[in-house]
Amino acid sequence: MSENTKREITYLEAVREAMVQEMRRNPEVFLIGEDIGVYGGAFGVSKGMLEEFGPERVRETPISEEGIAGAAVGAALMGMRPIMEIMFMDFATLAMDQLVNQAAKMRFMLGGAVSVPMVCRAPAGSGTGAAAQHSQCLEAWFVHTPGIKVVSPSNAYDAKGLLISSIRDNNPVFFIEHKLLYRTKASVPEEVYAIPFGKAKVVREGSDLTLLSYSIMVPRALEAAAKLAEEGIQVEVVDLCSLKPLDTETIVQSVSKTGRVLIVHEAPVTGGFGGELAAVIAESEAFDYLDAPIRRLAGRNIPIPYNRTLERASVPQVEDIEKAARALAREGR
């Protein structure tokens, strides 16, 4: 292993490094959004980029998510590769027409004559006390939209590689960055590398049940799995990484092996991506290997509260995953 490979940086630094390296490599790549220049981004992700690339390629915008998205779509159609930053994922709702009705559909509507190579970066999730309008996980809305790819990396290594792939892709990509992951560290090579979409990772092997997750729930799942291992319960943790395209092969193989599956995500359970995962399993050959019903553990069907105790109780925590996995592992035995 090289010294570069051993280097540890934060998720935030990995996202910045991916953007900087791609902007140095390709002059068509630029960053656009609110407070991304002098201020360095709401979470400091773009700090220092204005000084290197200037205001033409780190473009400050008014507070108008629809305007940011519209400018990104237009630039992409003209051959540029914009990275648009939505300050909070919740505010993507203000850009839905541009993202869902324009970016996602233009290539199809024009018979492939154009492409829309743009990335929408969106900090998401609860845990910072930001309350109901700044804490949502809306990935299911975008997974539901044909024409948009959706990725949600759980660690710094995947964040860099998947963002580079997103910038180079000729389709719109919705890139979800959980706010609580920004300060987490991982070993990340300094050299440029791309991670392909549609490839899940078995990040912990086990034999008693499969736990499917992504984003912030992956480290929580790993922590719960380590505790359950002390009781003799071996949990296999699968990090989906890419929600669309989805690696159904890895999912089916893991569930067929363990015979039990727990699906965990932060977004509310009703209409959440977990329902799609459950359907994928139920419609596959893995269904015949199930020894217990498919179980979901997800956020409550409520807006995220401001109160920190209530906020924590509204989405799955390590102890919730541990409890649900333990019960499932014992079910029917």
Image (cartoon, rainbow, N blue to C red):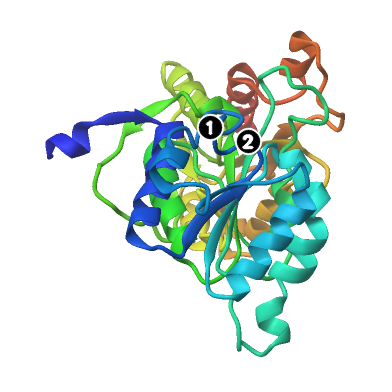
Q: Mark 2 near mark 1, Cβ–Cβ under 8 Å?
A: yes
- As drawn, the label of residue 40 is 1
Q: Residue furthest left?
A: 2
Q: Amino acid at mark 2?
A: Asp
Q: Residue 130 versus residue 55: which sits nearer the camera?
A: 55
The spot of residue 272 in percent (x, y) is 76, 46
Mark 2 vs 1, N-terminal side:
2
The spot of residue 89 in percent (x, y) is 70, 41
The spot of residue 45 in percent (x, y) is 50, 34
Q: Residues within 10 Å of mark 1 (few under 14, many from 20)?
A: some
Q: Amino acid at mark 1?
A: Gly
Q: Secondary structure at mark 2?
A: loop
Q: Residue 23 versus residue 97: which sits nearer the camera?
A: 23
Instruction: From the image, tell me which residue sits under label 2.
Output: 35
Residue at position x 52%, y 64% in the image: 81
In the rendered image, the vertical position of residue 195 relative to residue 153, given as above or below: below
Say how many tags the image has.
2
In the rendered image, the vertical position of residue 38 relative to residue 313, given as above or below: below
The C terminus lies in quadrant: top right
In the rendered image, the vertical position of residue 67 relative to residue 171, given as above or below: above
The spot of residue 74 in percent (x, y) is 67, 69
Marks 2 and 1 sit apart, C-alpha to C-alpha, by 6 Å
Q: Is residue 206 visible?
A: no
Q: Is residue 173 visible?
A: yes
- As drawn, the label of residue 257 is none
